Amino acid sequence: MSLRIALLETRDEGLAGGDDRDAIAVRAAEGAALALERACRANGWSTVRVEARADAPDATLAELARAEVDVVFQLVESLRGEARFEAAAAWLLEWARIPYTGSGPVAITLALEKPIARAVLQSRGVPIPEGFVLEHAEAAIPISLAGRRWIVKPAREDASHGIDAGSVVDDESSLRARAQHVLRTFRQPALVEEYVDGREFNVALLGSGPTAEVLPLGEIDYSRLDPSHPAVLTYAAKWDEASVEYHATPSIGARPMARELEERIRATARAAYAALGLAGYGRVDLRVSARGEPFVIDVNPNPDLSPDAGFQKAAARAGLDHAHTVRRIVDDALRRAGALA
Ligand SMILES: Nc1ncnc2c1ncn2[C@@H]1O[C@H](COP(=O)(O)OP(=O)(O)O)[C@@H](O)[C@H]1O
Ligand SMILES: [Mg+2]
């Protein structure tokens, strides 16, 4: 079938909060869009790139209508520097009844509000680390901190914004200092979670509903990281090619593990994907405790689809090249819109 695909993108320069370095992640989206265009063409489809205009949703819809597209590749990550507007783009496409790739607006909203995602996951029995939210650095702490490590993260960012070696803390005063930093820099509450000190897995899922396919597991290789540095995927590790961490924390195919553990990780990832209602494609990040229990630490709707990013690496391990992955995602969008059997 020859399709016409619109790549719907943001042209934001940075985050509303955060610092200059946080803009690198935003620029990486440009490379992903170019690769997706190539993949669409390899499938014999035509493409048009459309800017999601923060000031003019009506003009954005009019442009999509003029282009007579069959499917929108939904690549909006933020509007006016605010990630929560990604859901607005999905709602707009729902409203206009235009088939689009990836997760719907509710899943996007839930996943971005980590404390709400945690509540939903917990209500479905999906294991998450113990944790709490601080709205103010001096607020009361509802559980005992003693004898455990904690990680302090912004309650609603992704792409490791706000994560560095200082995010991991052992005592109340450093925890409160870090929460203060998150509150000030990102202008949002701080989520404090028990630090799960063990292997970190990325589980990519392709498809929607009960037939979603769990792709071969990926793992973050922390073995080359200086032991004085906590084993966390920092912002620099994810985006700053000049940093030591970038090269010391590669994402690799999961190393061998007991079959039972692998099955548990896959089932937990699938349960998290379903609980938040992700669709099309997504990635669930988990860490395994010293006692061998997997905990979900992050659920990502619409993860980076660049050929060198984790999602495509997992797809390649299942034998899918980039064009094939993109075809599966577009087919899924058409099927959900009722345009494909
Ligand atoms: N509870 C946790 N225990 C251990 N490490 C964690 C925990 N939460 C986050 N991390 C580390 O921090 C990184 C980024 O956190 P994550 O919640 O995935 O944020 P983001 O949405 O920015 O990707 C993770 O990849 C992991 O290395
Ligand atoms: Mg993550």
Image (tube, grey):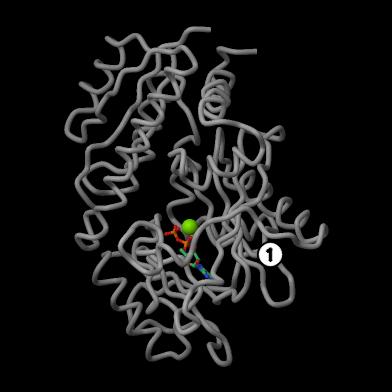
Q: Pick the residue in front: 44 or 116.
A: 44
Q: Is residue 115 left or right of residue 163?
A: right
Give the quadrant of residue 189. Answer: bottom left
Q: Return the x and y of residue 233 as percentages of the image width and height.
A: 46, 65
Q: Return the x and y of residue 294 as percentages of the image width and height.
A: 68, 64
Pointer 1 residue: 294
Q: Is residue 172 left or right of residue 55?
A: right
Q: Pick the residue in front: 273 or 322.
A: 322
Element marked by disc 1: strand
For badge 1, the amino acid type reads Pro
Residue drawn 57% across the image and 55% down it: 252
Residue drawn 59% across the image and 76% down it: 197
Q: Return the x and y of residue 322 as percentages of the image width and height.
A: 51, 31
Q: Residues within 10 Å of mark 1 (few under 14, many from 20)?
A: many
Q: Return the x and y of residue 162 as percentages of the image width and height.
A: 34, 66
Answer above or below: position of 292 versus 55. Answer: below
Give the quadrant of residue 178. Answer: bottom left
Task: Respond yes or no on whether mark 1 lies under 8 Å from ligand 1.
Answer: no
Residue drawn 20% across the image and 21% down it: 59
